[in-house]
Image (cartoon, coloured by chain):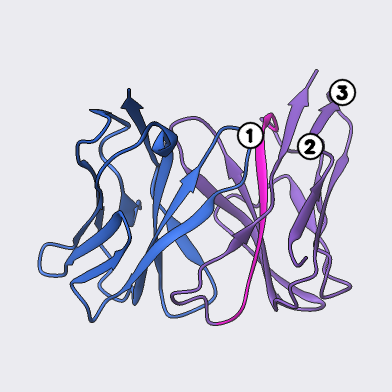
């Protein structure tokens, strides 16, 4: 049972344009959602999170939107930069001690 | 500098051998985790521990074992019973509840069976 899903394995955008990464979930008990960025052969690093009681959280070029009725969240990166090229993981917390991760989306930002 | 350290970065194992991956943190986090990353499958939880001398199986615990004798350390043993051990292994730690803080990850260990 895949509770967190990222349906797009890859995304390619031009430098300066917007990148939109999507994530769907099934468990209505999730209380926080997080995005991580991962470069090859490195551990993931935390990017941004959002509480289930909010619908938007912004941090610089990164904005996360949450649509609870659709059980959908998205990460917007504006403007996209070549250094943003990485795998992005969506994750969700179930009020406890563990995160559930999606499969990841490989973002490529072309100069 | 506080952080979480995994060693070694690369590890080669012969079939039939057990091997232990090290994970140490000095963040004073209560919880520690082991994940496995395979292409196209995201991060899958192997074991986790919320407190010293206690740990729980994750989604893919078969063929693995762990111990948590000290708060700072959570080593993972990949046993010969693990049928497909070649993967990238990630250790993480966290305060509890996880909530918005998320995990702090180590830099990973690439295990290859030869």
Q: Position of residue B88 (x, y in %)?
A: 65, 36
Q: Classify mark 2: helix, strand or loop.
A: loop
Residue under disc 1 on the same chain as residue under disc 3: no
Query: On residue B9, which mark appears?
Result: 2
* Left or right for A59, reference B69: left
Q: Position of residue A75 (x, y in %)?
A: 27, 53
User: Between residues B100 and B38, which one lies in front from this camera angle?
Assistant: B100
Tell me the distance, in whole angstroms, between the alpha carbons under discs 1 and 2. 9 Å
Q: Residue at x 54, y 54 (%)?
A: B59
Residue that mark 1 sits on: A41
Q: Residue at x 53, y 53 (%)?
A: A45
Q: Position of residue B95 (x, y in %)?
A: 61, 78
Q: Residue at x 82, y 75 (%)?
A: B71
Chain B color in figure: purple
What is the quadrant of residue A14 in the picture? top left
Residue that mark 3 sits on: B14
In this view, A95 is above or below B13: below
Residue under disc 3 on the same chain as residue under disc 2: yes
Q: Classify mark 3: helix, strand or loop.
A: loop
Label 1 crowd bin: few (<14), some (14–19), many (20+), radius 10 Å = some
């Amino acid at each position: 049972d895949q509770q967190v899903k990222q349906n797009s394995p890859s995304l390619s955008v031009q430098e300066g344009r917007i990148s939109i990464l999507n994530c769907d979930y099934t468990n209505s008990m999730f209380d926080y959602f997080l995005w991580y960025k991962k470069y090859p052969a490195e551990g993931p690093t935390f990017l941004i999170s959002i509480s289930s009681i909010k619908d938007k959280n912004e941090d610089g070029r990164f904005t996360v939107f949450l649509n609870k009725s659709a059980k959908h969240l998205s990460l917007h990166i504006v403007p996209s930069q070549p250094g943003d090229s990485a795998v992005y993981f969506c994750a969700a917390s179930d009020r406890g001690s563990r995160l559930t991760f999606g499969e990841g989306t490989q973002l490529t930002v072309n100069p | 500098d506080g952080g979480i350290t995994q060693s070694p970065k690369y590890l080669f194992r012969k079939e039939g051998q057990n091997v232990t991956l090290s994970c140490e943190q000095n963040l004073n986090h209560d919880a520690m985790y082991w994940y496995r990353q395979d292409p196209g499958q995201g991060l899958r939880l192997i074991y986790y521990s919320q407190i010293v001398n206690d740990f729980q199986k994750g989604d893919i615990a078969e063929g693995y074992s762990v111990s948590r004798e000290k708060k700072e350390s959570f080593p993972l043993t990949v046993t010969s019973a693990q049928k497909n051990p070649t993967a990238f292994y990630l250790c993480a730690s966290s305060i509890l509840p996880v909530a918005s803080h998320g995990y702090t990850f180590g830099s990973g260990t690439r295990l290859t069976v030869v």
